[in-house]
Amino acid sequence: MGIDKRALNFLVIIMLSFATFWWTFFIFHTPFELDVVLSVILIRMVSSFVIFSDYSLSWSKASQKTFLIKSFVYIVAFFVYMPIFYGKVRFSFLLSELFLYLFAINFSMYMYYYLMNRSRVTKTKSVVIYGAGRAGIKLESEFANSQYKVKYFIDDDIIIQNRSIDSIQVISKHKLKEKIGNDKLDLLVIAMPSASQDRIKEIYDNLSEYFKHIQILPSLDEILEGRDFTAQLKNISVEDLLARHPKDLDKSRISSFIKDKTILITGAGGSIGSEISRQCERYGAKKLILLDHSEYNLYAIASEIQKVDTALVMQSVVNREFLDETFKKYRPQIVIHAAAYKHVPLVEANIQEAILNNVVGTKNVIDMSIKYGVEKFVMISTDKAVRPTNVMGTTKRICELYAQNVVSLENSNGNGTDIVAVRFGNVLGSSGSVIPKFKSQIENGQNITVTHPDITRYFMLIPEACELVLQAGAIGSGGELFILDMGEPIKIVDLACKMIELSGRVDIQIEFTGLRPGEKLYEELLIDESDTKTPYESITVAKPTKYDIDKLNRDIEELLTCEDKLAKLKGIVPEFNHQPN
């Protein structure tokens, strides 16, 4: 049976005290006094037992706090026995022995900790950590038990450059390039959770050629407490390089808009609708009515939403009668309308269904919101509604017109349903977008297909786009068409090249297939430049377009029954310039 390690603590006190006293008596050229030594040992043992249960501290799990506790315990003991021997034993003698003992006990503990925790793994790979802050230091300690050897820290702070952490040198980017030369190290870890997307992109552009792989820590909001940072590292992705993080996100405004409200979300299982649902849960909604005509999508999002009362409605927005029953039953205070057909070529091939789902479906949801006194209705629109070249964009433009004109601005502002629309471009990683398609092609070893070398698109991360949608909804008072700042447009061919580069595949090429039906080279967010600023730089308001609501209702009825639907779409949206390609 093994000895209780807590008892070993007292054995260590006895042995080290005898050793340090013997040496101190020897240095001071005084005879060894056993009664003094035994008295000090007894007081030290009592202090270790009483103060912070020092005797039970695990040396193999020692931390900085453990070392401080050890020092505190024996300094307290010193102030107990020092008055007892004052006048009998020189003060300098006792103080010298104390310092020697503190060094001996802490050095012994550190050596034990080091021997018990030193890595038995053979170091076969090299890693450089960008960021010598708390996250970087934590990663360095975790890499100790891995196959990776930390070669350098990189930090932009010139104050700590040319210093070292655990004998690992802290250097600049420029110095690293000089040291590596033409070689390639295995891994670069960007250990800066608060770094902006621009900063991450700058680091990647500067150093990617010097490393086989680059990984990053999640953002501060995404880091899981209690888990090792090395387990949370992720490969740098095209989303990390292209994502835009709005600096004026007003989470308190969003929270006051969502908290304790009953919210109906149409298209709740789609890319946008599902993220809206998650964020409404996060911001403290009272109840969520998740409406989607896809059984699987509804099931998938329902399995994620656990912290808020949820009603699942498997229904199409086209069915006005069923929609009426849903509004009557749940009486939502806020409606967020994300249900729509969005895939341009599919809509071109199914014009009748697109008109029904996008135009009639949106009209139904708006009409029910007004009928049942919904406080605020928020419609998700698209940049393809601006000077549309395809049926999908034109149907969404009709939805914008209906949303802007069905309730006049004078009758809104708290006296009716505040109806607003939010227009933005592509979201990174949404179903049907180019990024999942490109990833699939790369994984399958296929060449990436791009429709045209000059085609460009706006991009934003789904969570950030959805938060801005909620923020726009919070500030809307009715009749506004909000435009989200999407930054600069990105060439799709550059996106494809970046994804091939990140994959490390040298066998993947790019093939140009020609523009698809209804597709245009450049997307726009404004019809004209007469937009209005809001309190937030990321959100502007487009100039309202007046359209007599009675005429628009008649035009929509005619659109459903007429033979030449493209001509009628052109009649409602004069800027529609159909490009079947």
Image (cartoon, helix red, strand yellow):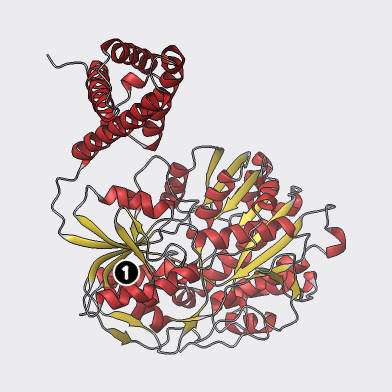
From the viewer's perspective, is residue 13 above or below residue 501?
Answer: above
Q: Residues within 10 Å of mark 1 (few under 14, many from 20)?
A: some
**In the depicted view, which residue is nearer to us: 91 or 396?**
91
| Horizontal side of residue 486 vs 24, given as left or right | right
Quadrant location of the C terminus in the rendered image: bottom left
For numbered disc 1, what is the local secondary structure? helix
Q: Amino acid at mark 1?
A: Lys
| Horizontal side of residue 573 vs 15, given as left or right | right
**In the depicted view, which residue is nearer to us: 119 or 457?**
119
Residue sitting at x 55%, y 82%: 523
Q: Residue 288's spot in the image, x, y percent?
A: 59, 43
| Horizontal side of residue 111 vs 49, given as left or right | left
Q: Which residue is mark 1?
A: 439
**Which image quadrant for residue 393?**
bottom right
Q: Residue 426's spot in the image, x, y percent?
A: 51, 71
Determine if residue 158 is in view: yes
How many numbered discs, if any?
A: 1
**In the depicted view, which residue is nearer to us: 162 or 90?**
90
**Which image quadrant for residue 174?**
bottom left
From the viewer's perspective, is residue 361 above or below residue 210?
Answer: above
Q: Give the residue at the far front of this rendering.
A: 29
Quadrant location of the N terminus in the rendered image: top left
Residue sitting at x 55%, y 79%: 488
Determine if residue 432 is in view: no
**In the depicted view, which residue is nearer to us: 142 or 543?**
142
Q: Residue 520's spot in the image, x, y percent?
A: 50, 85
Q: Residue 539's spot in the image, x, y percent?
A: 67, 68
| Horizontal side of residue 519 vs 235, given as left or right | right
From the viewer's perspective, is residue 10 above or below residue 406?
Answer: above
